[in-house]
Image (cartoon, grey):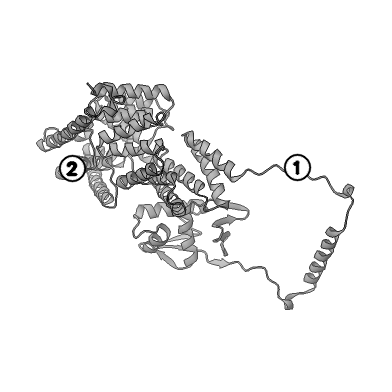
Amino acid sequence: MRSRVDDLTVDVRRREVRRGGDRLTLPDLTWRLFEVLVERAPDVVTFEELARRAWRRRHVSPDALTQRVKLLRQALGDDPKSPRYVGTVRGVGYQLIAPAVPELEMAVGPRLLGAAAVIAILGLAAATAWMAEPRDSADEPERPTLTAAVTVEERIASARDYLARADNESNERAARLFQSVLAEHPNAVDALVGLSFVYGHRATKYDGGAIWADEAEDLARNALAIKPGEAEAWHALGLSLDAQGRVDEALRAYQQAIAANPDDRAAMASAAYLLQIQGRLHEALVLESRVLESGGATTYSELQIATALHLLGYDDAAWAWLGRAEDLKPDNPLLTATRVQLLLSEGRHEEVVAAAAGDDEAARGAGLDVARGEALFALARYEDAIAAFRAANGQRPDAGRLEGLALSAWRGDEEAAGRAFAAAEQQRLGRAQGDRWPDSSIAAAAALTAAGDVEGALERLDDAIALGYRDWRRLSASPFFASLRGDPRFAARMDRVRRELAGQRALVVGDSRLSDVAPSTQG
């Protein structure tokens, strides 16, 4: 059914929105939100109903809902200060301001056949007769040669090629190609999976924001509903959950991908990364060794091996693996980020700043700016540190905010201390809703330390350690926890991490499968 909404034409069957001859691009979840508003117009749709019908969940965070409506308004060209299409009913929900008026099919009844209609019919009959008459070929104008249309398979192949290039511009080109396929074939599994990867990369690599992780999850689940055993769909689902901090669920999805396709080296590397996040370093290295045995490394394997070995205390081996990664792919965008993490752990803050400054500002990710801010804080360059945290937050709304508030609170800003406390509480609620990312708890611990809530900070450190955080050297060198270094309770937590690492080292040393991954640990 087609409807008119102000100057928009909405075709529910085709899942299209057009303004004049231009089609407006609405990602899948954004479309479902708009579809619910159109269906219920002009009624107000509550937050709960939108969560249930658009997200297909019982609860959606207010931030996720707000960001999704923001994306819808941007796609429609709506002004939130003076909305034309989507209105907000504070505390209740959203509504479509303009009525959704169904477009009637063009039908003419016998009583409506006037002279113009009769003339049109006669004209059509005459034209039909003319088309049926034989004509001399000399009378026909020369027809242009038509170029063969690009097939669906060719578009998907081209999109995959762009996706494999691992840069933001190519990622967006892949998005357009996958979207063009889905516009014609909404159930094309390869395109659903490909676009899920695109959105997952948008959220994780290119700081597009967590909202794209929701889109990626939705597309992957749609693909799995059509083809449950599709290995790449499980891999894409893992990436989308990974981007949301749902580590346990993401790991299970990656493991499903590996079970469906034991040769999926990228899924193995992704699973290894999450095992590392959980502190299961021995298992992570075993999986990375399988990646190497299967015919070479992925974009990430060498860097992840370097990080795991560094956490285990095998610094020389870690730096050697980082050097190998640089030799194999010197333009890998994650090289600098990994180098900076290792330098931070070793307390080499001047080198952190120099390494981060070497990257083009537009290419720096939010995580790199957070690390740069921490190093600048350690060097007492406070204004530069705050600027770095703000830069991170400008790239990604969940990055740098807690650290920036913590630094401001540490410098005596009482208002910032109050906001740091509130933000840390919000993080705790996020963990209750499924965020299993250890770094989130570390950032909250830093904020609470600066706000003067030592007990709360220690509890968040406990959370992070339970979730798998193992970089005790970085915590010990971090300016955020300088006031806790003399506290025996902080020291006890660092001892706990060291004991966990000693157990992982024993497993690595005793495993002959890892002789090529960590040769310095054998013998």
Residue plotted at (70% across, 42% down): 147
The residue that mark 1 highlights is 145
Q: Is residue 486 above or below residue 31?
A: above
**Residue 311 x, y percent position in the rendering:** 24, 30
Label of residue 272 in the image? none
* N-terminal-most mark, 1 or 2: 1
Give amino acid for label 1: Thr
Residue plotted at (41% across, 37% down): 263
**Residue 443 x, y percent position in the rendering:** 26, 40
Q: Specify the quadrant of the image occupied by residue 522.
A: top left
Give amino acid for label 2: Asp
The answer, for residue 208, to whether it is visible in the render is no
In what quadrant of the picture does the C terminus appear? Answer: top left
Label of residue 462 in the image? 2
Q: Specify the quadrant of the image occupied by residue 148.
A: top right
Measured Cα–Cα span from mark 1 to mark 2: 71 Å
Residue at the far bottom: name it: 111
The answer, for residue 32, to whether it is visible in the render is yes
Residue at the far left: name it: 488
In what quadrant of the picture does the N terminus appear? Answer: bottom right
**Residue 40 x, y percent position in the rendering:** 47, 67
* Relative to 515, 24 lies left or right: right
**Residue 188 x, y percent position in the rendering:** 52, 50
